[in-house]
Image (cartoon, grey):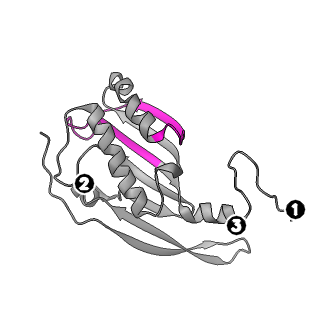
């Protein structure tokens, strides 16, 4: 099947830091790290996802099935598993697929992109985020696609709702409006 890797426990870690607020004082912010359990996170020094302010940043995610640490040789199956892994990270971060605003597809062979389109359409067809695709050598030859996303954090959406922004295509109230 695919390359075997040891699984690490999943989880998140919260870090606090100060950032200037509108008055120039320091407002407490938190940064929360999300782990998939991939050994690469520890070995390389990154997180599967990072919640920071209004956004959730999901690292380039491959098609490894973290339940048994295997990867399919089929690029379409890998694309599907990428989104399963991305959804898992977003849910743990308090967000979801429907909150994705940006997606980057990285393929080892650009001719593999079109066969993946039905998977991409099924996962993101209603969301329609900004997107980029490029071809690059990936960390090992078993990996044929890697997908990275940025999503809104639910807290940002709640603030927008409180501010009266209900339709993302309509501008919300400005500072001068009641």
Region rendered in magenta = 124-149
Out of 40 and 86, give the one closest to the viewer. Answer: 86
Q: Is residue 144 visible?
A: no
User: Height in image: 23 above or below 138?
Assistant: below
What residue did someone put label 2 on? Answer: 40
User: Height in image: 113 above or below 11?
Assistant: above
Q: Which mark is residue 162?
A: 3
Q: Which mark is residue 71?
A: none
Q: Is residue 152 visible?
A: yes
In the picture, measured across the screen, residue 167 lies left or right of residue 44, that is right
* Contact? badges 3 and 1 (CB < 8 Å): no
> x%, y% of residue 151?
51, 52
**Magenta run includes residue 95:** no
Taking the spot 76% from the left edge, 50% from the top edge, the residue there is: 171
For label 1, the SS is: loop
Taking the spot 33% from the left edge, 44% from the top edge, the residue there is: 82
In the picture, measured across the screen, residue 164 lies left or right of residue 79, that is right
The residues bearing labels 2 and 1 have C-alpha atoms spaced at a distance of 49 Å
Looking at the rendering, which quadrant does residue 18 occupy?
Answer: bottom right
What residue did someone put label 1 on? Answer: 176
The residues bearing labels 3 and 1 have C-alpha atoms spaced at a distance of 16 Å
Taking the spot 29% from the left edge, 58% from the top edge, the residue there is: 36
Q: Which callout, 3 or 1, points to the residue nearer the camera?
A: 3
Taking the spot 32% from the left edge, 25% from the top edge, the residue there is: 112
For label 3, the SS is: helix
User: Height in image: 177 above or below 68?
Assistant: below
Q: How many marks?
A: 3
Could you tell which of marks 3 and 2 lies nearer the N-terminus? 2
């Amino acid at each position: 099947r695919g390359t075997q890797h040891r699984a690490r426990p999943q989880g998140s870690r919260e870090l606090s830091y100060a950032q200037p607020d509108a008055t120039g004082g320091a407002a407490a912010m938190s940064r929360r790290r999300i782990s998939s359990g991939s050994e690469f996170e520890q070995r390389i020094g990154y997180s599967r996802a990072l919640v920071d302010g209004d956004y959730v940043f999901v690292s380039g995610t491959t098609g490894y099935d973290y339940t048994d640490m295997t990867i399919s040789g089929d690029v379409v199956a890998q694309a599907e598993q990428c989104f399963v892994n991305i959804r898992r990270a977003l849910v743990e971060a308090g967000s979801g697929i429907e909150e994705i605003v940006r997606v980057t597809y990285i393929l080892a062979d650009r001719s593999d992109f079109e066969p993946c389109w039905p998977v991409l359409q099924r996962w993101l067809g209603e969301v329609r985020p900004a997107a980029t695709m490029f071809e690059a050598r990936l960390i090992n030859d078993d990996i044929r696609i890697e997908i990275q996303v940025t999503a809104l954090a639910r807290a940002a959406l709640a603030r927008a709702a409180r501010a009266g922004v209900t339709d993302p295509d309509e501008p919300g109230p400005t500072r001068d409006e009641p």
